[in-house]
Amino acid sequence: MDLDRISEMVAALCGSHTVTELTLREGATRLTLRRALAASAGRAADGPPPSLHQPEPYIVRSPLVGTFHCLLGEGQTPVAAGTAVQVGQVLGAIESMRILYDVAADAAGVVSEVLVEEGQPVEYGQELFRIQPPESGEGAP
């Protein structure tokens, strides 16, 4: 295969918003070039990637099957949208087999969405909270 021909394929693939795969065959040799879909998913054809506008929210997922509890103890208020959280801060708990397991934030930021309610059954991996990380430079020491 000719290097110039391969360079043309790469340029064609990179220059197109709709083409994600090109295959070149010469005799018994076959070369397939694929563009990763994750790089272009969720954005307008001519717009910049979302990461240039605003960081993607961090998703807190259920670590196990059980019942979600947002009230953690006397005097504590449930986490709501707009609440600033730190890494390791307990956001709620999952009750499974009569044992409470803390659900903590693995990222600092502001809770943008609470996706479950008190007493709601949850599945392993189910989204519980979305945390919007601080903009670049915010909250940095």
Image (cartoon, rainbow, N blue to C red):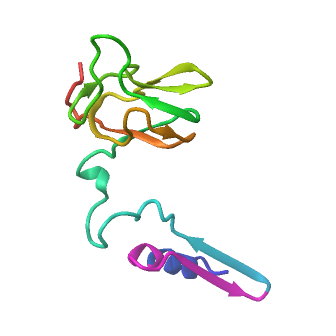
Q: Looking at the image, which residue sits at the far bottom?
A: 27
**Figure quadrant of the C terminus:** top left
Q: How many marks?
A: 0
Could you tell me residue 40's position as x and y percent?
Answer: 40, 65
**Of 55 and 93, the residue lying toward us:** 93
At x 37%, y 29%, the residue is 107
Position of residue 20 relative to residue 79, above or below, is below
- Left or right, residue 131 beside residue 8: left
Quadrant of the rendered structure where residue 97 is? top right
Residue 58: x and y in percent read 38, 39
Residue 29: where, in percent of width, then height?
Answer: 75, 81
Q: Is residue 124 magenta?
A: no
Write down the quadrant of residue 117 in the picture: top left
Report the magenta residues as a range.
Answer: 12-27
Horizontal side, residue 34 vs residue 92: left or right: right
Q: For residue 130, which quarter of the picture?
A: top left
Q: Residue at x 30, y 25 (%)?
A: 78
Q: Is residue 14 magenta?
A: yes
Can you say whether 57 is above or below 78 in the image? below
* Residue nearer the viewer, 137 or 55: 55
Above or below: residue 7 compared with residue 102: below
Q: Nearer the viewer, residue 75 or 33?
A: 75
Q: Residue at x 24, y 34 (%)?
A: 134
Q: Quadrant of the N terminus?
A: bottom right
Residue 120, x across and y down, in percent: 44, 38
Q: Is residue 37 left or right of residue 113?
A: right
The extreme right residue here reads: 28
Q: For the view shown, which residue lies furthest in the top direction?
A: 74
